[in-house]
Image (tube, rainbow, N blue to C red):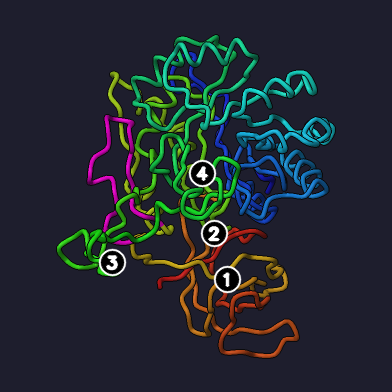
């Protein structure tokens, strides 16, 4: 099956004038990009070794960027490249040549936040669409129109906006100026990610791609006259993560975002695992396809239906800090923070990525898997299909690369998993496996 054979027609309207939006996924590495595309991303975004705000992601060398662009385009998927640092003078060295390289390899857009870099891009690569990063803090129609006059093709709006504010900005822009909204992923406690804590604590500048994520640290109180004596900030004595926001999740707001004309729905996570990327993209792809197929029911009599519970249940099986809709319905409160721990307990863990599978005509029932967590003989493992369904099966036997039986596969091992005949699954390379913790 081709990468997009299973997808709904993205030109189908939810209501007159409203097209289905692009699903935009993070690609912190080639492997993550492949997983995102496998599970239905329409576009991916990635960064090079320089000029990107995720300096500690794997990122792509120039040769790897060329390969990524070729792979994405072969799958009919667009590739956008981040050039979104707030540059100091020394950061600009080599930028013109790099921008020209991105044009030469066929990048479908460059994501920029710095006005100086934007100016250089317009002069150097005038034919490549410029996408404005969320770091530019677009929070009102006048702000949005300003960037539109600067030649920006797409605006990734600030994450501090309500649905009503997003709708106002959409109406203020020309029809061919696109808007992009973050719908899922980690949230920064600072305004649209402009944080100084990391530089203050560690010397790593968040605005030049080196954030140390101090908002996830555990904090306690120290009184000036009692050095070395730490006081918990909560009565239970566990300390508190006072800056630790829950993760953004706008799954249940997809119909509203579609109807107001949002062009692209963006998932955060270039530094997350391949399992996280694939599993989250999978749910949002399935949800968008469900809405497209049931668009008349969703919009009948101006009422807004909600997605079946299975979609959120699947998201809850991905590692998370809990979920919040952030500012989408109004300012967030204490319930949108996770004060007592850095993340919630995870019920499921990823165990592997499919690298190959048996020939059904030969009645061979096995998967070749790269293990990501221990896999044991006798485990019940779930295969994540390219829809909302999962296929559970028992690991009947484990073989190493030499065909020798083993009791347990460890992370990094390439192993062959045998399973019972009669299990119906659409096995595919890049498919993900998980099990209960």
Give the mark nearest the N terminus, 4 or 3.
3
Give the mark nearest the N terminus, 3 or 1.
3
For this view, does 64 lie left or right of residue 179?
A: right
Nearest the eye: 328 or 262: 328
Please say if the residues under marks 1 and 2 sit with CB atoms less than 8 Å apart.
yes
Q: Which residue is disc 1 drawn over?
A: 372
Q: Quadrant of residue 396?
A: bottom right
Please say if the residues under marks 2 and 4 sit with CB atoms less than 8 Å apart.
no
The x and y percentages for residue 87 are 65, 34
- Quarter of the rendering occupied by the C terminus: bottom left
Give the mark nearest the N terminus, 4 or 1.
4
Give the mark nearest the N terminus, 2 or 3.
3
Range of residues picked out in magenta:
320-341
Q: Which residue is disc 4 drawn over?
A: 268
Tag 2 secondary structure: helix
- At x 42% / y 22%, what residue is drawn? 139
Nearest the eye: 99 or 382: 99
Q: Which residue is disc 3 drawn over?
A: 227
The x and y percentages for residue 430 are 64, 58
| Label number found at residue 434 | none
**Rounded to the nearest whole Å, what is the CA distance between mark 4 and mark 1?**
22 Å
Secondary structure predominantly adopted by residues drawn in magenta: loop
For this view, does 365 lie left or right of residue 183?
A: right
**Rounded to the nearest whole Å, what is the CA distance between mark 2 and mark 4?**
14 Å
Looking at the image, how many numbered discs can be counted on the residues? 4
- At x 66% / y 55%, what residue is drawn? 58
**Rounded to the nearest whole Å, what is the CA distance between mark 1 and mark 2?**
9 Å
**Rounded to the nearest whole Å, what is the CA distance between mark 4 and mark 3?**
40 Å
Q: Which residue is disc 2 drawn over?
A: 275
């Amino acid at each position: 099956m081709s990468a997009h054979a299973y997808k709904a027609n993205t030109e189908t309207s939810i209501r007159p004038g409203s097209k289905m939006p692009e699903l935009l996924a993070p690609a912190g590495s080639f492997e993550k990009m492949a997983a995102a595309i496998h599970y239905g991303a329409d576009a991916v975004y990635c960064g090079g070794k320089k000029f990107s705000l995720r300096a500690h992601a794997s990122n792509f060398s120039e040769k790897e960027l060329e390969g990524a662009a070729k792979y994405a385009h072969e799958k009919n998927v667009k590739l956008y490249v981040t050039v979104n640092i707030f540059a100091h003078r020394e950061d600009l060295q080599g930028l013109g040549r790099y921008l020209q390289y991105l044009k030469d390899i066929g990048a479908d857009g460059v994501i920029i936040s710095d006005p100086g870099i934007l100016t250089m891009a317009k002069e150097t690569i005038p034919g490549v669409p410029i996408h404005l990063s969320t770091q530019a803090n677009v929070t009102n129609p006048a702000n949005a129109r300003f960037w539109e006059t600067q030649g920006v093709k797409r605006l990734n709006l600030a994450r501090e906006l309500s649905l009503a504010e997003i709708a106002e900005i959409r109406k203020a822009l020309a029809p061919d100026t696109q808007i992009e909204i973050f719908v899922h992923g980690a949230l920064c406690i600072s305004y649209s990610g402009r944080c100084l804590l990391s530089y203050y604590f560690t010397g790593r500048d968040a605005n030049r791609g080196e954030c140390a994520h101090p908002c996830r640290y555990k904090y306690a109180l120290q009184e000036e006259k009692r050095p070395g004596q730490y006081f918990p900030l909560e009565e239970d004595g566990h300390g508190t993560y006072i800056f630790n926001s829950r993760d953004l999740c706008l799954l249940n707001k997809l119909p509203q975002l579609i109807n107001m004309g949002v062009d692209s729905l963006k998932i955060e996570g270039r530094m997350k695992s391949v399992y996280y990327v694939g599993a989250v993209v999978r749910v949002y792809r399935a949800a968008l396809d469900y809405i497209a197929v049931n668009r008349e029911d969703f919009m009948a009599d101006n009422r807004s239906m909600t997605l079946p519970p299975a979609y959120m249940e699947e998201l809850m099986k991905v590692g998370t800090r809990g979920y919040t809709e952030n500012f989408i319905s109004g300012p967030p409160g204490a319930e949108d923070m996770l004060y007592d721990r850095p993340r919630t307990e995870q019920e499921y863990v990823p165990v592997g990525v499919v690298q190959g599978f048996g020939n059904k005509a030969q009645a061979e029932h096995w998967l070749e898997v790269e293990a990501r967590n221990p896999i044991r003989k006798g485990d019940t493992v779930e295969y994540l299909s390219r829809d909302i369904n999962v296929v559970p099966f028992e690991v009947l036997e484990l073989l190493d690369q030499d065909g020798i039986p083993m009791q347990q596969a460890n992370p990094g091992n390439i192993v062959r998993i045998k399973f019972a005949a009669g299990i119906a699954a659409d096995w595919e390379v890049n498919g993900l496996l998980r099990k209960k913790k």
